[in-house]
């Protein structure tokens, strides 16, 4: 999807692809949090410690 965004697209298609990318990112986050038994709050704390 990100490769498609690099091209010249009509605004409505760009908007649709951006929304799909954001949803895919959220789904990946949910899967990773579940896999490692994390909550979003723990992740934010861990990122701040790095």
Image (tube, grey):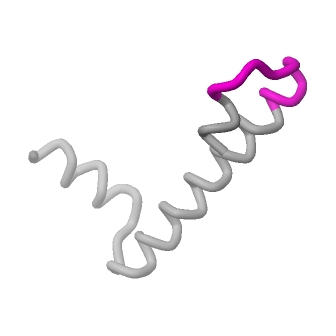
Which quadrant would residue 3 be assigned to in this image? Answer: top right
Which quadrant would residue 43 be assigned to in this image? Answer: bottom left
The N terminus, quarter of image:
top right
**Residue toward you, 5 or 31:** 5
| Magenta-colored stretch includes residue 36 | no
Q: Is residue 10 left or right of residue 42?
A: right
Q: Is residue 11 left or right of residue 30?
A: right
Expressed as whole percent of the image width and height from the top left, the position of residue 9 reads 81, 22
- Asked if residue 15 is positioned above or below residue 22 in the image, the reply reads above
Which quadrant would residue 17 be assigned to in this image? Answer: top right
Q: Is residue 12 left or right of residue 14?
A: right
**What stretch of residues is rendered in magenta?**
6-15
Q: Which residue sits at x=52%, y=63%? A: 28
**Residue toward you, 17 or 3:** 3
- Asked if residue 34 is positioned above or below residue 40 in the image, the reply reads below
- Asked if residue 22 is positioned above or below residue 36 in the image, the reply reads above
Q: Which residue sits at x=83%, y=36%? A: 16
Q: Which residue sits at x=40%, y=58%? A: 40
Expressed as whole percent of the image width and height from the top left, the position of residue 48 reads 17, 42
Q: Which residue sits at x=45%, y=78%? A: 34
Label count reads 0
Expressed as whole percent of the image width and height from the top left, the position of residue 15 reads 80, 28
């Amino acid at each position: 999807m990100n490769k498609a965004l690099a091209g010249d697209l009509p605004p409505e298609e760009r908007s649709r692809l951006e929304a799909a990318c954001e949803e895919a990112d959220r789904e990946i986050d949910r899967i990773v949090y579940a896999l490692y038994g994390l909550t979003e709050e723990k992740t934010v704390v861990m990122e701040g410690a790095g």
